[in-house]
Amino acid sequence: MASLNHALRALLLGGVLMAPGAAIAHPDLATFVAAAFSKEPVTVDCTLENGVGAKCYEITVNYLPEGLKIGPFCPATLDDAGGIWHWTGENGGLYRVDAEFLKMLDGLGYRFFDDDGTVHVVDNATERPTVDHACINVSADETVKITMRLPVTPVMAETPTVLGVVGKVGVALDGVPIFSDAPSIQQTGHMPALDTCGGHIDPGGWYHWHATSTDIDTVFDQAKVGAHCALEQDSRALFGYAFDGYPMVGSTEMDGTAAAGLDQCNGHVGETALGVTYHYHASEEFPNLPGCLVGVQAQNNFSTTATAGIGATRAGEGGRNEPPRPDDGGPGHVPPGFDEAAASLGVTTDVLMQALGNPQGGRPDLAAAAENLGTTEAKLRAVLPPPPGR
Ligand SMILES: [Zn+2]
Ligand SMILES: [Zn+2]
C-alpha cells in the first residue's frame, strides 16, 4: 500500500503525469555564466531544513557580476525616469518610477519630491532618510562576497514553503541572488526602487533580483508599463535555480508554448534543458517568481561578507551605516549555535530568530523573546550560545 501511494504521488507530482522514478535533475553548475563565481564552486556536506544530511553545491559570487549594467533606480528629479516599482496601495500595480507615478503617490499622501521637483533620494549606505518618504538608492560595496548553497539532489518537502517579503528564492545563472517581494512603501515609508530588469542593491551593498529579469519584458507588455530590460529576453530560457535546487525557467516551455498544469508554486514536472524534472516557471505578472518553494532548502544557505543587510556576517562592526533591518536586511544568516538552540526549544530556527529580533545588531530582549516562544527567560538563556566576546 505504501509503495502504491508512493507511485501515485510520483504520478501526480506537480499535477502532470510522469513515470515513477523519472530522473530529477541536479543543478548544473555548467549552466551558470562562467564569470558568475568569484571562486570555484565546491561540493560540501550540508544539512537540509528537514534535518537530513545531504551534499550541497557551495557557490561564492561577487557583489555584482562583472559587466552587468544596473540602474537607474531612483529618478533625480520629476523630469527623469527611474526604474520600476510594484505599488500595492490604491491603484496598485507595476509602475515606471516617473513624474506621473510619483504625483499619483503624492495624491495618495506619499510625497517623494520637493516643490522644485527634486526627488528625495537617500543612499542607505551612508545616510538615513530625514523625510517620511524617500527613494532608496544604495551604493554598492565592491568588496562584498555572497556564499550560497544548493542541494545537489533536490528533495520534495512535505508542504511547500511560502516566500513572504524578501524571502530567499534562489540564484540566477549570472550568480545574482533572487529574493521575493521587496518591502512595501506602506511597511517602511520608503521606496527601494528597482531598475527596469527588476534588481537593486541591498543595504549590504550587493545587487540582487526581485524578478525573473530575462523574461521581465513579458510583464511590462502585460501590464502596459513603459519599461524595457536591456538583458537578453527569452521566455523559454533557464533563468536560475531555486534554493531547493529545482530549476527556474521563463514563462513558456522550451518550444515556446504556454506552461500548463502549474501548481500553487508556479511549477510542474516536464521537459527542461536539464531533462525531465520539476521546474518553476516565471509568471506574466510582477513579481514573476514562484510564490513558494516545493522542495527542501539547505540550512544556512545564504551568507554575505557585508556589514549590513540580508545574511550579513560582519554586522555591527561599523562601516556601512545601516544596521540590518527587518525589510531588505532581515533574517538570513543564522549564527552558530542557534539551530541547536531552536531544536532544544522545539521551535524552528526561523521562529527563534524572529523572536530574538537581530541578536547580532544589539542585545535581544530575552524576556520578550521568551514570552513569544512560550518559554521562560531562564530556559532561553540556558540554551542560547554565549554572545561573541567583543
Ligand atoms: Zn531587495
Ligand atoms: Zn514547464
Image: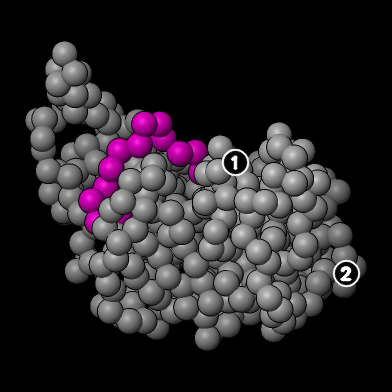
Q: Which residues are magenta?
A: 151-164
Q: Which residue is mark 2?
A: 130
**Residue 65 appears at what percent x and percent y?**
41, 78
183 sits left or right of 146 in the view: right
The residue shown at (80%, 53%) is 365
Q: Which residue is mark 1?
A: 345
Task: Work out which residue is located at the far top of the displayed protein and give it.
Answer: 1
Cα separation between marks 1 and 2: 41 Å
Q: Identify which amino acid the numbered label 1 is placed on.
A: Leu
Q: Secondary structure at mark 2?
A: loop
Instruction: State which quadrant residue 79 falls in.
Output: bottom right
| 175 is higher (above) or lower (below) than 143 | above
Q: Quadrant of the N terminus?
A: top left
Please state which of residues 218 and 244 is positioned toward the viewer in this rendering: 244
Say if residue 342 shows up in the picture: yes
The residue shown at (58%, 82%) is 141
Instruction: State which quadrant residue 132 falls in.
Output: bottom right
223 sits left or right of 131 in the view: left
Q: Quadrant of the C terminus?
A: bottom right
| 115 is higher (above) or lower (below) than 261 | below
- Label 2 CA crowd tier, 10 Å (few <14, some 14–19, many 20+): few
**Residue 160 appears at what percent x and percent y?**
41, 35
Q: Identify which amino acid the numbered label 2 is placed on.
A: Thr
Q: How many marks?
A: 2
Mark 1 beta carbon near ligand 1 (under 8 Å): no
Model colouring: one colour
128 sits left or right of 62 in the view: right
The residue shown at (81%, 72%) is 128
Q: Secondary structure at mark 1?
A: helix
**Residue 191 appears at what percent x and percent y?**
70, 59
**Residue 227 appears at what percent x and percent y?**
52, 60
